[in-house]
Amino acid sequence: MAKSKARLDRFSETPRASEWLRRFPDGDAIIAAQMIDAMTLVSGDEFSGRMRDLVLRRAALADGPIGLYAEREVPPPKGPPNRLFDQAAKRPLRARGPGPPPIAPVAGGVGSEGIVATLITSLCRADKQKFFNHPGPDAIRSNRIRRFMLLTDLIGSGRQASRYIEAAWSVASVRSWNSFGWLGTEVIAYSATEPGMTLVRSHASAPEVSIVASCPTVFDAFDEATRVRVEDLCTRYDPGGARSSDAFGYDSIGALIAFAHGCPNNAPRLLHGTNRLGWIPLFPNRVTSASAEAFGDRRPLASLRERLRRMGQPVLARSALLDASHTDGRAVVAVLAASCRGPRTLEAIAGRSGLTLPEVETIRAVAMDWGWMKDGRLTDAGQRQLAAARKVRSPKVPLPIAGDTPYFPTQLREPREI
């Protein structure tokens, strides 16, 4: 049991990861282990459940029905994307016809859009009045759909989501509906990088972006010294060669996240790429099933201690309170610690603590009710809670008891004069 528990604490200690790490010399293996231990690993249930909850929360704030779309590649690969809907060739350029297919297989097969399309189907079946599955212009008009909601697992570079939105925006009717305030645009993702969210939000349609959890990357998940070593490792072991420009994945994002349905191409290529020299990655062809046992608890204790150390809380990271606390209690400690310094946005706190945005939002609301936080900052009472947590030490081990019969000495030494 102890061995199984340890494997859950660190991804690097799972059989598949340990086998992969043996391919590195000792020094590099340590850095590689630090890198994969910083990854966010999302199970299938975690992905579906959290995405469903977020869609329902956002839908409750929207007036009218919602059209749900699964993000996927829009042809052509280069240049402006094709229109998402058909429209008349002559003025008035009225859009018409059905919506886009949820899945359009390409040479590489069906990607994460297949998982997202299944989630969309489930949501639409559960509430046929609120959600519509990839509606086209005719369905948007007849059902008075008021929100174009794009779903995806990860906004990495943001290019694919932006192209999908642009494919809809290039339709004259969509621009008209938007200008009259009849059709808003929103993107829902499990995770996203800061550059990716910035690019998507900059689109002319001004889409709202909502995510479950921030995406750690090679460039922001470590302290400065470790970051330099991890970057060097990714460059030297890049399957494309040390001079390759894509060592950190597509668009050099360096995403440290993997889903049960696959590893994104934005992750460092030494994790998923191959070459003619026989390099074997941790996730061959971006398939993660060999590491399925690690896709469980998102908040292992070892990961929390490491995050607390990176927050500049080494004493708190060693506190025995973490061992004695339930996972929810540890989450409260993580949020309080992450709130000691700025920035204090939900995204920043979630990124430092390793929690999801809904979790951080809930904990902050509770902490405010308890008087521990105000306006995102710790109050004196909150500071006292952290100070008390730092003082909790492991109890001393009691002397072993040989049996139930009390021991009485039969010989006493003579007292000595002091």
Image (cartoon, rainbow, N blue to C red):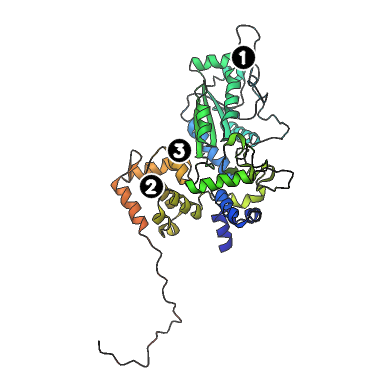
Residue 409: % across, % down: 37, 89
Q: Residues within 10 Å of mark 3 (few under 14, many from 20)?
A: many
Which label sits on residue 219?
Answer: none
Drawn side of residue 395 relative to residue 145, left or right: left
In front: label 3 or label 1: 3
Drawn side of residue 212 relative to residue 21, left or right: left
Task: List the single residue furthest toward the left.
Answer: 418
Residue 85 vs 51, above or below: the answer is above
Q: Which residue is mark 1?
A: 95
Quadrant into which the C terminus falls: bottom left
> What kind of residue is marked 2?
Leu
Instruction: Kindly report the distance in space between the C-alpha atoms of the residues bearing marks 3 and 1.
Output: 38 Å
Could you tell me if the residues under marks 3 and 1 are in contact, i.e. CB atoms within 8 Å? no
> What kind of residue is marked 1?
Ala
Q: Is residue 259 at least partly visible in the picture?
A: no
> What kind of residue is marked 3?
Glu
Q: Residues within 10 Å of mark 2 (few under 14, many from 20)?
A: many
Q: Which residue is mark 3?
A: 347
Residue 62: % across, % down: 48, 26
Residue 410: % across, % down: 37, 92
Element carrying mark 3:
helix
**Depth order, front residue of 304/56:** 304
Instruction: Kindly report the distance in space between the C-alpha atoms of the residues bearing marks 3 and 2.
Output: 14 Å
